[in-house]
Amino acid sequence: MQTAKLNGMEPEVYLCEVLNRIADHPINRIDELLPWNLMQSGANPAQQRRAA
């Protein structure tokens, strides 16, 4: 949660995003769900929701 904050993301929104993705996400690519990787993916709902 603190890492999400440090990366400029709303912690609650980040947690919801990870929980929505994790069930279908391959275990060998779990690092893609880290805050800085979600930000780089271009589809960062955590920041989009904050702006709304």
Image (cartoon, rainbow, N blue to C red):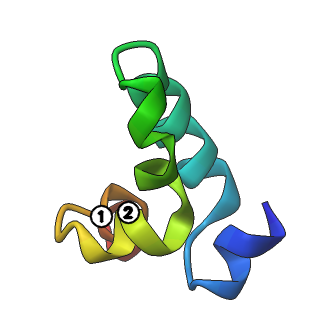
- Percent x, y of residue 2: 82, 71
> Would residue 1 appear left or right of 20 to someone viewing this image?
right
| Relative height, residue 43 to residue 7 (above, below) | above
Task: Answer few, some or many: residues within 10 Å of disc 1's Cα (few below 14, many 20 plus, some between 14 and 19).
Answer: some
Q: Amino acid at mark 1?
A: Asn
> Would residue 22 appear left or right of 6 to someone viewing this image?
left
Q: Secondary structure at mark 1?
A: loop
Query: Dot 2 corresponds to which residue?
Result: 38
Q: The C terminus lies in which quarter of the figure? A: bottom left
Residue under the point 49% across and 40% down: 30
| Relative height, residue 33 to residue 27 (above, below) | below
Residue 41: name its quadrant.
bottom left
Residues 32 and 7: in front is 32
Query: Dot 1 corresponds to which residue?
Result: 44
Residue under the point 34% across and 15% down: 24
Residue under the point 60% across and 66% down: 10
Residue 38: name its quadrant.
bottom left
- Percent x, y of residue 50: 44, 69
State the residue lying farthest toward the right: 2
Point out the tag, 2 or 1, that comes first from the N-terminus: 2
Q: Amino acid at mark 2?
A: Leu
